[in-house]
Image (spheres, grey):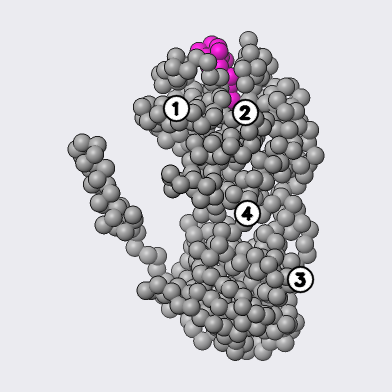
């Protein structure tokens, strides 16, 4: 199987800042990490490759320093990585981003499966995976919690919904976005890290992708960020439970159950 | 472990490089330098396992990669419950292959990125949670007579609870105890020494000048204006606990290492 994993470098959640003028996330001088949900997509791709053979290619669009997250994918066990990096990509919304990624997937060629994390923790849109499928006109499933490869051209996936889960049959090539519970992502080994540091990540520009420049960046983005604001801080409430130990323990259990924490 | 105490062998904590380091080569070189220095003076090198939940490389893989010498009496590996079963087996098998015999078995600090051992991984049916007790039992069962296992003792937890936990750890096979860091005589540790005179106890000495970090690590507030000289405190701890080993956490190899020979008089 040839599997492409689309990954993103995002600001560490507790360090994100927003430009008051442009309303965009300020990415410079902020600690950047691999989008946490993408670990699950990388892990799933590696597991499928290990089981069925083939190769895993990590793909990302971003600034120069996004090379780090691609190297992280290599250190986990991806075979190759590609970075889409050019000024023309800057300012892309999810539609323009998924267009660029789709063009890169076409250029890679003979891809059976594209995996994404369920969403990025900066934009939280969950739109890029479905956008890639739309641009490629491939089948897709979101919030996937289990993948079963039935044959070289067919797979059955279990996807989460509000009430439980759906079971879907898909034909390859397909695009899947995966959820946290699908696996336990491996922690890179030192050997993997050393190998990834030596890996030269190829950088592709719009010209390499044969992409229409009008479909990229701000020009190719039909959406605009009109207003952003931080979420209201959560209210911390301290409740002191008093009484005999057994009664306190029972009260604590009740409180946790009331909040669906048990 | 008694041999360490009788021969005044320090336990020197060294943190393996973090996974997210941008200067891996330099960090590995620094690690090797500290390791070799500590080995040379006869200390027991204690390698942490994702300390404070921060992702780091495993001590065993760093030793292997850098081809560092291992003297079985001079290396101790921390091992916590935040691993997959496969990784746990890898670490234990590497320890065995490298001739490392001391393991400090702890529950550990997790993070979103660290997997947690599940009860089913260890074939446990009577509990749903894996703590250091279950991990101790597993190592004893699967690697009989391969390792000498130690456990942590936290004098800042409610004493009754902590002593109860310690009993379970000792029943599960713990052969020595390492305390949380102290900077003065501690009543609960004194009780520990009276209750278990036959078990080797290693006192952890806080070697960083940053006392607020100790407050964060152990969860009790130390007044900010507390005067603290780590080397003088270390000397004092030797006097207070002459029959205990000493574990040095956050030791500065630049400013403190060369002074160690003068501290255990």
For disc 2, the marked residue is B148
Query: For the residues marked 3 and 4, what is the alpha-carbon distance in whole angstroms?
Result: 24 Å
Q: Chain of mark 2?
A: B
Q: Earlier in the sequence, mark 2 or mark 1?
A: 2
Query: For the residues marked 2 and 1, what is the alpha-carbon distance in whole angstroms?
Result: 17 Å
Residue B165 in view (yes/no): yes
Callout 4: helix, strand or loop? loop
Q: Residue A243: percent from the left, percent from the top?
A: 19, 38
Compared across the picture, whether A188 is left or right of B68 comes to left
Q: Are marks 2 and 1 on the same chain?
A: yes
Q: Is residue B124 above or below residue A182?
A: above
**In the image, which residues are magenta?**
B233-248
Nearer the viewer's eye, disc 3 or disc 4?
4
Q: Residue A127: percent from the left, percent from the top?
A: 51, 78
User: Mark 1: few, some, or many residues within 10 Å (few <14, many ≥20)?
Assistant: few
For disc 1, the marked residue is B167
Compared across the picture, whether A207 is left or right of B208 comes to right
Picture disc at residue A187:
4
Callout 1: helix, strand or loop? helix
**B242 drawn magenta:** yes
């Amino acid at each position: 199987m040839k599997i492409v994993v689309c990954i993103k470098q995002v600001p560490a959640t507790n360090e994100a800042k927003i430009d008051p003028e442009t309303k965009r996330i300020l990415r410079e001088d902020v600690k950047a990490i691999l989008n946490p949900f993408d670990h699950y997509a990388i892990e799933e791709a590696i597991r499928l490759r290990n089981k069925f053979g083939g190769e895993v290619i990590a793909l990302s669009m971003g600034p120069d320093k996004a090379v780090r997250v691609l190297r992280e994918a290599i250190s986990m066990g991806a075979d190759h990585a590609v970075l889409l990096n050019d000024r023309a990509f800057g300012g892309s919304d999810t539609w323009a981003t998924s267009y660029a990624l789709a063009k890169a997937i076409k250029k890679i060629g003979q891809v059976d499966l594209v995996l994404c994390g369920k969403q990025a923790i900066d934009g939280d849109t969950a739109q890029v995976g479905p956008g890639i499928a739309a641009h490629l006109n491939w089948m897709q499933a979101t919030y996937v919690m289990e993948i079963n490869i039935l044959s070289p051209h067919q797979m059955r996936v279990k996807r989460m919904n509000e009430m439980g889960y759906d079971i879907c049959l898909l034909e390859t090539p397909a695009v899947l976005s995966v959820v946290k519970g699908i696996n336990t992502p491996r922690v890179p080994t030192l050997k993997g890290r050393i190998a990834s540091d030596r890996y030269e990540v190829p950088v592709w520009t719009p010209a390499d992708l044969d992409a229409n420049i009008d479909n990229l960046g701000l020009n190719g983005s039909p959406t605009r960020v009109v207003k952003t604001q931080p979420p209201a801080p959560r209210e911390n409430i301290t409740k002191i439970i008093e009484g005999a130990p057994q009664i306190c323990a029972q009260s604590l259990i009740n409180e946790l159950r009331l909040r669906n924490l048990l | 472990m008694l041999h360490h105490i009788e021969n005044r062998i320090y336990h020197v904590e060294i943190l393996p490089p973090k996974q997210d380091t941008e200067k891996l080569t330099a960090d590995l070189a620094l690690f090797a330098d500290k390791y070799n220095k500590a080995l040379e003076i006869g200390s027991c090198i204690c390698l942490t396992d994702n300390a404070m939940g921060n992702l780091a490389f495993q001590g065993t893989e760093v030793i292997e990669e850098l081809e560092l010498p291992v003297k079985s009496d001079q290396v101790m590996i921390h091992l916590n419950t935040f691993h997959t079963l496969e990784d746990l087996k890898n670490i234990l098998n590497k320890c065995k292959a490298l001739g490392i015999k001391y393991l400090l078995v702890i529950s550990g600090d997790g993070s979103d990125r660290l997997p947690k051992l599940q009860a089913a991984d260890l074939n446990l049916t009577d509990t749903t949670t894996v703590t250091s007790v279950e991990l101790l039992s597993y190592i004893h069962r699967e690697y009989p007579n391969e390792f000498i296992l130690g456990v942590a003792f936290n004098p800042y937890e409610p004493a009754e609870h902590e002593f109860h936990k310690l009993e379970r750890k000792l029943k599960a096979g713990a052969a020595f105890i390492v305390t949380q860091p102290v900077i003065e005589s501690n009543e609960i540790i004194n009780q520990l020494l009276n209750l278990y005179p036959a078990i080797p106890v290693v006192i952890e000495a806080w070697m960083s000048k940053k006392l607020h970090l100790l407050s964060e690590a152990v969860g009790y507030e130390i007044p900010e204006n507390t005067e603290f000289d780590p080397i003088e405190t270390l000397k004092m701890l030797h006097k207070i606990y002459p029959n205990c080993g000493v574990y040095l956490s956050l030791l500065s190899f630049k400013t403190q290492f060369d002074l160690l020979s003068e501290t255990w008089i």
